[in-house]
Image (cartoon, rainbow, N blue to C red):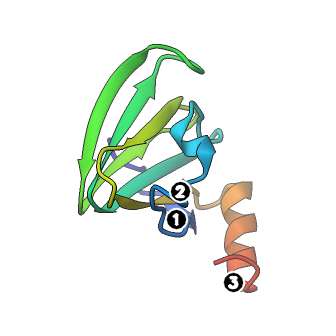
Amino acid sequence: MKIPSDFVNYRSTKVFTKDTVPKLLVKSHNTKAGVYGKITVLNGALKFYGLESDNGAVEAEVLISANESAISPPQYWHRVEFTTDDTTFKIDFYAQKDSDVAIKNLSERDDGIIS
């Protein structure tokens, strides 16, 4: 899966470890309408589970190893699972360049409000 070419990275998370990952990410959750998430593993490996619905059955399972990425499309239910204790990863969020979410977040980043 590819992120459409007219989408821009409007926000990125810090690097997460097993100890710092928000609990939300290891439970069933989804991305906002119009937002793609790109999960990049920097060290170790992470399993990405695509779900049929909130807390639904697993319909896809992807192992993301170090220096690899996986894309979660808008409003797709999913969760992640650490497969090694030394796993680190980050998430980059993309939205259409002219969308409200991209414009607002890019403006705040330019103003130094978010990184």
Q: Count residues near mark 1 (Cα–Cα under 10 Å), then give few for <14, some for 14-19, many for 20+.
A: some
Percent coordinates x, y for residue 27 in the rendering: 56, 34
**Badge 1 or badge 3: first in the primary sequence:** 1
Q: Please determine whether, in this image, residue 96 is positioned above or below residue 31.
A: below
What residue sits right under mark 3 in the picture?
A: 110
Is tag 2's residue or tag 1's residue first in the polypeptide sequence?
A: 1
Q: Position of residue 28 (x, y in %)?
A: 57, 30
At numbered mark 1, what does the secondary structure look like: helix, strand or loop? strand
Alpha carbon separation for disc pair 2 and 1:
4 Å
Q: Is residue 87 above or below residue 35?
A: below
**What x and y, as percent, mark residue 39?**
41, 53
Type of the residue with mark 3:
Asp
Q: Position of residue 95 (x, y in %)?
A: 58, 54
Residue 83: quadrant of the picture? top left
Q: Which residue is mark 1?
A: 9
Residue at 57 percent of width and 19 percent of height: 55
4 left or right of 21 in image: left
Secondary element under disc 3, as helix, strand or loop, is: helix
Tell whether 21 sits left or right of 111. Answer: left
Q: Nearer the viewer, residue 72 or 88?
A: 88
* Left or right of 33, for residue 87: left
Three-letter code for the amino acid on which mark 1 is drawn: Asn
Decide which of tag 2 and tag 3 comes sooner along the chain: 2
**Figure label count:** 3
Q: Secondary structure at mark 2?
A: strand
The residue carrying mark 2 is: 94
Q: Gap between marks 1 and 3, in whole Å?
A: 13 Å
Look at the numbered discs 2 and 1 and tell me whether their residues touch, using CB distance below 8 Å.
yes
Query: Would you place residue 25 above or below residue 91 in this image?
Result: above
Residue name at image x 65 percent, y 60 percent: 98
Q: Residue at x 70, y 76 (%)?
A: 114
